[in-house]
Amino acid sequence: MSRVPDTRPPASPSSEGQKDRYRRMLAAAVDLGTRQEFERVQMQDVAVVADVAIATLYRYFPSKVHLYVAVMKAQLATVDAKAFSSRPAAPSDPTQAVGDLLIMLTRRLHENRRLSMSMMQSIILAGGMEDAGARDVEDGFLAVLLKLTGWGNRATEDQRRRVWLVIQCWFGVLMTTVGGGRPLADAEADIRRACELLLTTSDHAG
């Protein structure tokens, strides 16, 4: 009989030991998600691979959706670090900067399509779950792109909406591409065009 997860909100790691177990659980989810479709990944198997008790896994991730949303969040955190390592704080062409980042991320996700589909499925399913962390992922990615455009915290409501629409377009293109329905080259052209249409403005510098 499968274990019914607790309904309490997911815990956050605080001590070094907890953080280590948390990283192992995410790594196990990546390992299993690379080899199996989302529907076939079992939480018990994740616990075994991570070498943690099943109760520990459910304490931090009440469901498989929570787990793969956290994987997505971790993936985007690495992109955040790389995005600003060699770019100026206020790029002269936000259309180019955002397009470059989204294409880089698309290529990376395309390399591990099975895992990527699990993460994207979880983001969609998490929309109806208040504590699954999807909003954190969305808000975090929005902040990354706003920073990359140079608009950052000074962005107007129109600028924020434009970047949000870029994210929505990108996610749709990513779903069809990672799912195998659209060539990667066409997806990259779609992303460039979406950025041109939505981010090219006379006041892009803020």
Image (cartoon, rainbow, N blue to C red):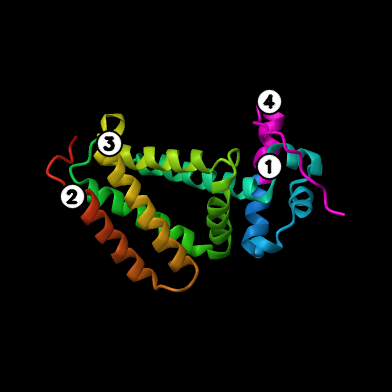
* CA distance separating discs 4 and 1: 17 Å
* CA distance separating discs 4 and 3: 39 Å
Is 7 magenta? The answer is yes
* CA distance separating discs 3 and 2: 16 Å
> From which residue to which does the magenta span run?
1-25
Q: Which image quarter is the N terminus in?
A: bottom right
What type of secondary structure mainly makes up the magenta span?
loop
Which residue is denoted by mark 2 in the rendering? 200
Mark 4, other Cα within 10 Å: few <14 / some 14–19 / many ≥20 = few
Q: Amino acid at mark 2?
A: Thr
Percent position of residue 204, x then y: 18, 41
* CA distance separating discs 4 and 2: 45 Å
Q: Amino acid at mark 4?
A: Ser
Mark 2, other Cα within 10 Å: few <14 / some 14–19 / many ≥20 = some
| Tag 4–tag 3 contact (CB < 8 Å) | no
Q: Which mark is in front, 1 or 3?
A: 3
Which residue is denoted by mark 1 in the rendering? 61
Percent position of residue 115, x then y: 58, 59
Q: Residue furthest right?
A: 1
Q: Secondary structure at mark 2?
A: loop
Near-viewer residue (108 or 169):
169
Let me know if residue 87 appears in the view: no
Looking at the image, is mark 4 or mark 2 earlier in the sequence? 4
Q: Which mark is in front, 4 or 2?
A: 2
Looking at the image, is mark 3 or mark 2 earlier in the sequence? 3
Q: Quadrant of residue 82?
A: top left
Q: Amino acid at mark 3?
A: Glu
Q: Quadrant of residue 104?
A: bottom left
Which residue is denoted by mark 3 in the rendering? 157
Q: Which mark is in front, 3 or 2?
A: 3
* CA distance separating discs 1 and 2: 40 Å
Q: Residue furthest front?
A: 128
